[in-house]
Image (tube, rainbow, N blue to C red):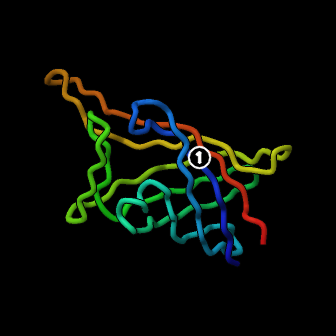
Amino acid sequence: MNRTWIGKYTDIGHKGQDEDFAFRIDAELNKELSFKGTVWEEEFYEKSKLFLSVKGFINGGQISFVKTYPCLFEIDENFNTIIDKSKKGHEVVYSGTWNESQGKWEGTWEVKGDILFKDVDYYEEEIFSGLFEMSLMDS
């Protein structure tokens, strides 16, 4: 069955402060409650006119999904947008729970960044994360 969720995620915006960005997931949900489809994402679509892909599942009161950008999309240290359609995009992993009283999914997203080598035997991996929420769009 087709499902459409609308929501928002929080990330650092062009002014270096947290901002909310809208998204919409259009997906096919199967009997096992796995789903796949496309994502319209406010900021990315404005600049690229492209959609993301999504795969995920629902297990009771838990949801997990991965949004994949079709090309490189990042914000540099001066908060300028970089889109390079010749390079591979990154994945964003979402994990959340059902909030019965609010009637929506809530949780966190996470993106793995660069690996920073500090020493021969020591490195750190950058992790970017934030919050999200989404609800089923009324039919």
Q: Position of residue 85 (x, y in %)?
A: 25, 65
Extreme bottom residue here?
1
**Structural crowding at the residue carrying mark 1, measured as other residues with C-alpha within 10 Å and reported as few (<14), some (14–19) or many (≥20):** some
In percent of width and height, residue 113 lies at 32, 40
Left or right: 15 as drawn, with respect to 94? left
Q: How many marks?
A: 1
Residue occupied by mark 1: 95
Q: Residue at x 60, y 70 (%)?
A: 26
Q: Left or right: where does residue 139 sit relative to residue 71? A: right
- Image height of 93 relative to 67, above or below: above
**Quarter of the image where the C terminus is located:** bottom right
Q: Residue at x 16, y 21 (%)?
A: 119
Q: Position of residue 138 (x, y in %)?
A: 78, 67
x 55%, y 70%: residue: 36
**Quadrant that contains the N terminus:** bottom right
Residue situated in front as seen by the camera: 105 or 41: 41
Q: Nearer the viewer, residue 65 or 47?
A: 47
Disc 1, SS = strand
Where residue 30 sits, quadrant-wise, is: bottom right
Name the residue at the right extreme. Answer: 101
The answer to whether residue 132 is above or below residue 5 is above
| Viewer-side residue, 18 vs 90 | 18
Report the amino acid beneath label 1: Ser
Above or below, 128 against 86 in this view is above
Q: In the rendering, at what x and y percent does residue 137 appear?
A: 73, 64
Residue drawn at (44%, 54%) of the image: 43
Residue occupying the far top of the picture: 119
Instruction: Answer left or right for 84 relative to 4.
Output: left
Viewer-nearest residue: 23 or 105: 23
The answer to whether residue 136 is above or below residue 7 is below
